[in-house]
Amino acid sequence: MRVVLLGTAAGGGFPQWNCSCGLCAEVRAGSSRLSPRTQSGVAVSADGERWFLLNASPDLRAQIESFPPLQARAKPARNSPIQGVLLTNADLDHTLGLMQLREGRQLRVHCSPAVRENLTGGFPMAALLDSFCGIQWLNAPENLMPLLCHDNSPSGLLYNSFFVPGKQPRYMQGKALSVHGHSVGYKIADERTGGRLVFVPDIAAIEPGLVPRLSDCNLLLFDGTFWSQHEMHERCGIDISAGQMGHIPVSGEGGSLKILAGLPAKNRIYIHINNTNPILLEDSPERAAVVAAGVQIGRDGMEFNL
Amino acid sequence: MRVVLLGTAAGGGFPQWNCSCGLCAEVRAGSSRLSPRTQSGVAVSADGERWFLLNASPDLRAQIESFPPLQARAKPARNSPIQGVLLTNADLDHTLGLMQLREGRQLRVHCSPAVRENLTGGFPMAALLDSFCGIQWLNAPENLMPLLCHDNSPSGLLYNSFFVPGKQPRYMQGKALSVHGHSVGYKIADERTGGRLVFVPDIAAIEPGLVPRLSDCNLLLFDGTFWSQHEMHERCGIDISAGQMGHIPVSGEGGSLKILAGLPAKNRIYIHINNTNPILLEDSPERAAVVAAGVQIGRDGMEFNL
């Protein structure tokens, strides 16, 4: 299975359009200690020809142009190797990219019932896209099942989803849903090689029952949004905590790094990194602490073969 | 007045993600005869400090990063020199960028009542953004009025809008509106220099009454979406005409070039150019015909001082 990190920043990207915090200012100035990052998204393929997107960021157009295997093939004039999109939640930074795929064939969108409800009753993407390509909704399965291509042929991949602690998208706050499960993670396995990816870009807490799920893979792509609970306040004067935004911080007693450090996956990678997070800085002590724990910091274009 | 063309392609951009027509394939291969283009949008400013966007394309994040005057100033940590957004219609390629500005202060969106209705009843951007920055709607005036900054101070610019023949956004088809005027053009004038821009990126026909409007400017930015009526069919096998998409073609007896050739503006520029349009190709006879008529082909980053 080929896995490529199309984008590794949290919502807003790095730099963020309206931010001049130390990190955003320095990356705009072309610092060698920082790399610009587009908003979080991943592409996977068993055969290198037929691809699935894991989330669809607002930067998707640029991400497709940065990675030739996702581009249209020579014939016919209009086509795409993208077979479907798997959503972990209905946040805007994970779903706006679907609107950019409107010129193509019907979209196959895999997600939880709650995410579908958000994208029907909150952000009516389903109705909007019905005037263009339309959406075929598929319930992300709880048990490992074949992930089918657009023509229903096998892709060579198996997948399942699992609920993780999360929060409603901000645009749905105050609206009651008929179902639970705002955020899911995915396991994706290659039928031939046995390679296994676990993808969890948004998670508010690591409950003990989740650790076996995070352990059963060669590659773990994990929520690295914030270094600490109160980073948004300290760096940008915005009074909202990591927890209130639905993310477990990397550092601290209850942070994710202590757990990731003990997991067996060969590659454990932080993704979905906010522009305020000091692990972005290549010579920061925070980054050094992550690396010392055997965990890596994702960057755009990073590729893995599982 | 400074005017910068942030993006000069029609919806989908150039290349378009799912297109491998001759032009898209050649620009991806890095041809020297073609330049990539992001989706249509313009920025204007009287003082070079405080800026207004004309339409907000899905590529807005990358466009801001490509043009430093639109980026956040040094302090406070979160800020933006963008004072407001003027919309010509409610098409997705002109409005999706508003969603990318959600992390900032309240958005001031200038548009016609019909566009506002599209973005309330069709694509409920107003409700979605209420959970973030919120939108303050301003009716684009029919007569020249001061264009105010976010704090209501004068910007040094005057503006007015005028209805042009257009069509409903595709996502609104079949829905009746209470008001007319899906598309408008804008005139923007510098109070100090008298420099005048007319901006018309989408227009289905040039009615005789419109010619005086198009004549009263130093810089005309005009709909160059299609070279010919049936280009989409010929190049991509898609059976829809320029007229059905709400655009007058450049060429032919009823085309825009014959009219633009006779207009007095020093700079007459085609913008909003579709990926199928042969004027994109620097050595095409179609481009030569445009240049021979005294009209230019817009490209991303082009700047004017009026």
Image (cartoon, coloured by chain):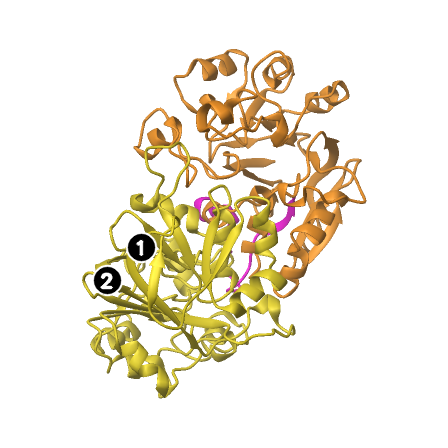
Chain colours: A yellow, B orange
First along the sequence among labels 2 and 1: 1
Residue A237 seen anywhere in this rendered image of the structure: yes
Q: Which residue is mark 1?
A: A154
Q: Chain of mark 2?
A: A
Q: Quadrant location of residue A287?
A: bottom left
Pinpoint residue B28: horizontal percent, then vertical percent.
Answer: 33, 35
Q: Amino acid at mark 1?
A: Pro
Q: Amino acid at mark 2?
A: Glu
Pinpoint residue B115: horizontal percent, then vertical percent.
Answer: 71, 44
Instruction: Please say if the residues under marks 2 and 1 sit with CB atoms less than 8 Å apart.
Output: yes
Q: Which residues are magenta?
A: B65-86
Does residue A154 appear left or right of residue A10 in this picture? left
Does residue B68 appear left or right of residue A159 in this picture? right
Q: Where is the C terminus of chain B found, in terms of image quarters?
A: top right
Q: Quadrant location of residue B135?
A: bottom right
Q: Where is the N terminus of chain B found, in terms of image quarters?
A: top right
Q: Does dot 1 land on a helix, a strand or a loop? A: strand
Q: Which class describes the residues within 10 Å of circle 1: few (<14), some (14-19), or many (20+)? A: few
Say which residue appears at 56% left-offset and 75% top-offset: A179
Q: Indicate whether residue A175 is drawn in magenta.
A: no
- Tag of residue A191: 2
Q: Indicate whether residue B70 is drawn in magenta.
A: yes
